[in-house]
Amino acid sequence: MDSVCRPLAVSLGDPAGIGPEVVAKCWDCRDRFGLPPFVAVGDPRSITAVWDGPIAVIDDPREAARAFDSGLPILALAAVESDVPGHPSVAGAHCSLDALELAVGLARSGSSAAVVTGPVCKQQLYGIGFSHPGQTEFVAERCGVSPGNVAMMMAGPSLRTVPATTHLPLAEVAGNLSKSLIEMRGRAALRGLQRNFGIADPRLAIAGFNPHAGEGGSLGREEIDIIIPAIETLRGEGWRVTGPHPADTLFHGPARARYDAALCMYHDQALIPLKALHFEEGVNLTLGLPIVRTAPDHGTAFDIAGQDLADPRAMAAAIRLAAECARTRALAAT
Ligand SMILES: NC(=O)C1=CN([C@@H]2O[C@H](COP(=O)(O)OP(=O)(O)OC[C@H]3O[C@@H](n4cnc5c(N)ncnc54)[C@H](O)[C@@H]3O)[C@@H](O)[C@H]2O)C=CC1
Ligand SMILES: NCC(=O)COP(=O)(O)O
């Protein structure tokens, strides 16, 4: 079976969040959203609590394509106790981690064409001893890739951004920026554009860190000491890289037309423009992995879980992009 025929594995995320609801809604709207067969991984009770559509509990991902027309296929994991939507629990955190582990394993073994991860609650996971900043680093470790060599890309119809640093306190960002970090993230972004999007000669815009990109050193020296030397190294390797650009003018329409992705210095610098423009269809794609991994841009949204208010479009975009990236990679390998 080729990568296009294999199902995608979709972990449900935290059972008390909106992951189960948006996955079920994606199955409901599979034709309208243009979705390929996928198999959910998680506790079926988290779906039946919020959805009364048909579920097909399967034991083997190879059954997913056949089952997909008549019901939402699910590889079932039972949490110790079932969660009430909107009320996260320790058992639910364990269940979300087990589902993530299994779904990533399916992609690594080739049983699924890609993995799409439902939203987890980081605070809950940290509480049960999860030692990674996020799912990005967890998946990297499971794939045997150093966290330094992967990058989180947030992708929407008119913008792709990559934060150089991800989940760490803002007060620690400056101390974590280095020439080598920016070079590694820059290479991961550029190679990721080639490998997943088929862009042969990608253009990367690199944001500054300080207001006005430091104003020649008067408003901070990170641009002079770290970012410009990294840009020069990347250019010396033949990449099309510009910057450092003042971040406040990097995201309006004409600016976005000048690059294929923007490398940003910290989480909110990258995620605010993406979510402001494309919250309903934003996708989180991990670059630098041997497998394809995507996720919707949103979180667990406990505040609306179980109320039939969750918009499934970002999850649908994540499933679609995962299938497209798997197809692009498969074609390049032939
Ligand atoms: N990929 C992942 O696993 C992610 C997980 N998170 C986690 O999610 C938790 C909550 O994070 P928040 O910052 O509150 O962000 P959030 O995205 O869960 O919610 C922010 C706001 O947007 C709304 N919202 C989110 N998704 C929606 C959807 N599909 N349809 C309609 N409304 C939606 C929520 O109701 C809330 O008002 C945190 O614990 C965080 O760690 C956050 C982002 C990504
Ligand atoms: N803000 C993005 C986010 O939380 C997703 O991170 P990850 O769990 O995919 O690493």
Image (spheres, helix red, strand yellow):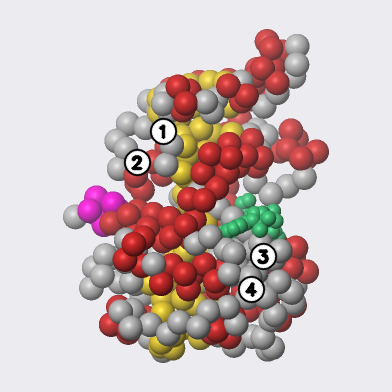
Crowd class of label 2 (few under 14; some 14 to 19; many from 20; radius 10 Å): some
Give the numbered dot on residue 260: 1
Check if mark 1's residue and mark 3's residue have beta carbons within 8 Å.
no
Q: Label 4 is placed on what type of residue? A: Gly
Check if mark 3's residue and mark 4's residue have beta carbons within 8 Å.
yes
Q: Which residue position is annotated with label 4? A: 306
Q: Earlier in the sequence, mark 2 or mark 1?
A: 2
Measured Cα–Cα span from mark 3 to mark 2: 38 Å
Instruction: Please tell me whether residue 253 is drawn above or below residue 323 in the rendered image.
Output: above
Crowd class of label 4 (few under 14; some 14 to 19; many from 20; radius 10 Å): many
For the residue pair 64 and 102, the one nearer the viewer reads as: 64
Measured Cα–Cα span from mark 3 to mark 4: 6 Å
Q: Is residue 90 left or right of residue 54?
A: right
Residue at 44 percent across and 88 percent down: it is: 57
Q: Label 3 is placed on what type of residue? A: Ile
- Tell me: is circle 3 under 8 Å from ligand 1: yes
Q: Secondary structure at mark 3?
A: loop
Prevailing secondary structure class for the magenta stretch in the rendered image: helix
Instruction: Please tell me whether residue 108 is drawn above or below residue 256 in the rendered image.
Output: below
Residue 60: give x, y in percent of width and height: 38, 86
Specify the farthest residue to the right: 171
Q: Which residue position is annotated with label 3? A: 304
Q: Label 1 is placed on what type of residue? A: Asp
